[in-house]
Image: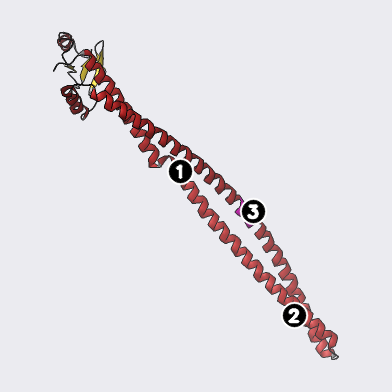
Amino acid sequence: MKASESQQADLLSLSNLDLEITRTRVAIAALTSGEAFAALRQSQRDAAASLIESRNQLDSVELELSRAEADLKLVEQRIDKDNQRLNQTSSSKDAQGIQAELETLKKRKSDLEDFELSILERKEQAEAAYQVIIHDKKLIDDELATKESENEAQIIKLRSGLDLLTQQRNQQASRIQSDLLELYEKKSSRGLAIGRLVNRECGACRITIGATALAEISGLARDEVATCPDCQAILVR
């Protein structure tokens, strides 16, 4: 096949554009896959699970506290009622019974107050742990949101660049003779279709061409399309 040196140079430029288009598409695919954020999203899920667990623990402590407060209130009401009965009774026997009951109630009240204090301490610890998890989760959420925003901006930039590259590619392809372009497209389906011959090295496969094959290539007219004996890519001399 014959093709002018300028046509061969145009074909090499087309190949460079195709390589850039491929690299851009690979970059877009990587950014849209979400794999870059897999670890961060897992951290977000773990933080959300920890937050639910911590909230449940806090709710449990608060429920326990409300029950203890209710029990204490009942004991205090019973003490008030017994004190009123003690003040009103004129029977020494009844008074002794009320006094004994008051002693029991006071002991019960003391135990409940101590229990309430222990619950309050646990509630304070649970609230502190809950706030720490909220803070940590917010940091993860903010980091993920920032990175996703940056990622989306990069995708938009790459897609815009891809549109421009595609337009340039179409314009470049329109300047190349049809049979040469068809040969290039056919070879492209199997790998790199074209490379520049530098000294004895094929720019497509990077293999050094033997002396006999190099002599044959050198003997071709400048407008004769040469190919690499190893990878069959078009060689631009």
Q: CA separation, marks 3 and 2?
A: 36 Å
Q: Which residue is mark 1?
A: 39
Q: Which residue is mark 3?
A: 128
Residue 127 picture location, percent across and down: 64, 56
**Relative to the observer, which residue lies in front, 18 or 144?**
18
Residue 112, image quadrant: bottom right
Q: Is residue 95 above or below residue 202?
A: below
| Residue at the spot 52% in from the left edge and 42% down from the top edge | 143
Q: Amino acid at mark 1?
A: Ala
Residue 2, image quadrant: top left
| Chain-order first, disc 3 or disc 2 | 2
Residue 92 can be seen, yes or no: yes
- Give neighbour class at mark 2: few <14, some 14-19, many 20+ (Cα, 10 Å): some
Question: Residues in magenta?
Answer: 126-131
| Residue at the spot 38% in from the left edge and 40% down from the top edge | 32
Q: Which residue is mark 2?
A: 78
Residue 168 picture location, percent across and down: 31, 26
Q: Amino acid at mark 3?
A: Ala
Q: Is residue 156 left or right of residue 10?
A: right
Q: CA separation, marks 3 and 1?
A: 26 Å
Q: CA separation, marks 1 and 2?
A: 58 Å
Residue 21 picture location, percent across and down: 32, 29
- Give neighbour class at mark 3: few <14, some 14-19, many 20+ (Cα, 10 Å): some
Q: Amino acid at mark 2?
A: Arg
| Chain-order first, disc 3 or disc 1 | 1
Residue 147 picture location, percent across and down: 48, 39
